[in-house]
Image: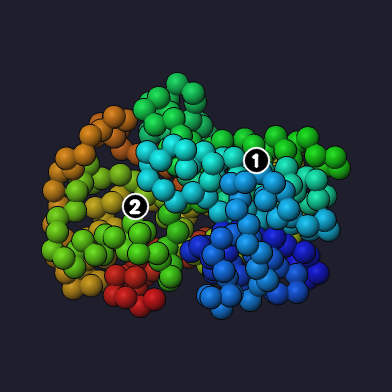
Amino acid sequence: MQGLRIVVTGATGFIGRALCRRLGDPRTWTAVGRTDAEQLGLPVAFNTVDLQDEMSARGAIPPGTDVLVHLAAHRGGPNDATGHFRGTAAATMFLCDAAKRAGVKRVVLASSTSVYEPSNDIDRLMTEDAPRVRFRPLAYGYAKKWAEDAARLQAMLAEPAMQLWTLRIGMVVGPGQRPSSWLSTTMARLRAGEPYPLVGERGHRLALVALDDVVDTLAVAIAGDPPRDTPKPGPLWNVASESWFERDAVELMAKAAGLSARFAASSAPDPFGWNERPLSLAVDGSRWKVGMGAIAGRPIEPLLAAIARGED
């Protein structure tokens, strides 16, 4: 990675902070966003840019940049269709177009396992007629899928060729969780003695991965060689090491914190049939683990317990 000029979006987010603190260098790394990275003590230069504005985003990638690491995404609610389109799908299109104009050789895109439909196999993507798309056409997962499509198209049209590494990342477990994260809000619920709303007997399945594994994966995607026989424009990895039911994760965290977990049936509407078909996930990890040198992945249980005990 030495000498590579890298632009990273979402550097002040959960994954971005860990990436920059481990690997960042102010001589070669530039963070792009609306929050000043210097306030967090990140070892990177910072450029304030509104990624939702096409002309502003175009100036975010200076000529001579080698790698764009795109971690930023809109963080609004699931029904915020306009925000998810502008802040995730359109912003990715603008950035990848800027990268292509600047001669960037590689784009690393952080996507999500939420691009999968409920109960679909890991190799099936959401389609235009999927229930989630019909009910919430620009919900978080589908905006991520559109961002993938935009990045792939820009990479395929780039001259000379631009490599695209797409990382579909599961729920990341590690220190520095945001207060709005599922892990943080679940612990707040447990400490308040509130029952956890559970769909079915065990809830949804969660695709979990350790934060350090994600940072290691990003390092390979930034500077590593793609595995042999990788189709163009580049690798697509499902970055998730373990599968947990919600109930199992909640019970483990409650026990680690010395609390009792109570559960209640969810009263939320179920337009996607999740009561009958729990959410499936991309947790095979085969391409990811092989590409990373057949790693086993860090165990999730001690990480969940540490977060429950507040050992951040």
Q: Position of residue 300 (x, y in %)?
A: 40, 63
Which residue is nearer to you in this view: 118 or 75?
Answer: 75
Q: What residue is shown at x 19% (from left), y 48% (from top)? A: 197
Q: Position of residue 273 (x, y in %)?
A: 29, 30
Give me the disc on residue 210: none
Q: Which residue is mark 1?
A: 93
- If the image is split into quadrants, where does the N terminus sit? bottom right
Q: Which amino acid is tagged 1?
A: Met
Residue 230 lies, with reference to residue 126, above or below; the image says: below
Marks 2/1: CA distance? 34 Å
Which residue is situated farthest in the top direction here? 129
Q: Which amino acid is tagged 2?
A: Trp
Which residue is situated farthest in the right direction here? 160
Tell me if 304 is positioned left or right of 209 in this view: left
Q: Which residue is mark 2?
A: 244
Which residue is nearer to you in this view: 110 or 101?
Answer: 101
Which residue is nearer to you in this view: 134 or 113?
Answer: 134
Quadrant location of residue 80? top left
SS type, badge 2: strand
Q: What residue is shown at x 68% (from left), y 38% (from top)? A: 152
Is residue 189 visible in the rendered structure shown here?
yes
Which residue is nearer to you in this view: 43 or 212?
Answer: 43
Q: What residue is shown at x 61% (from left), y 70% (from top)? A: 20
Tell me if 134 is positioned left or right of 263 in this view: right
Residue 66 lies, with reference to residue 304, above or below; the image says: above
Q: Position of residue 58 (x, y in %)?
A: 72, 48
Q: What residue is shown at x 40% (from left), y 64% (from top)? A: 178
Q: Residues within 10 Å of mark 2 (few under 14, many from 20)?
A: some
Tell me if 32 is positioned left or right of 121 in this view: right
Q: Position of residue 73 (x, y in %)?
A: 52, 50
Tell me if 266 is positioned left or right of 218 in this view: left
Is residue 163 visible in the rendered structure shown here?
no
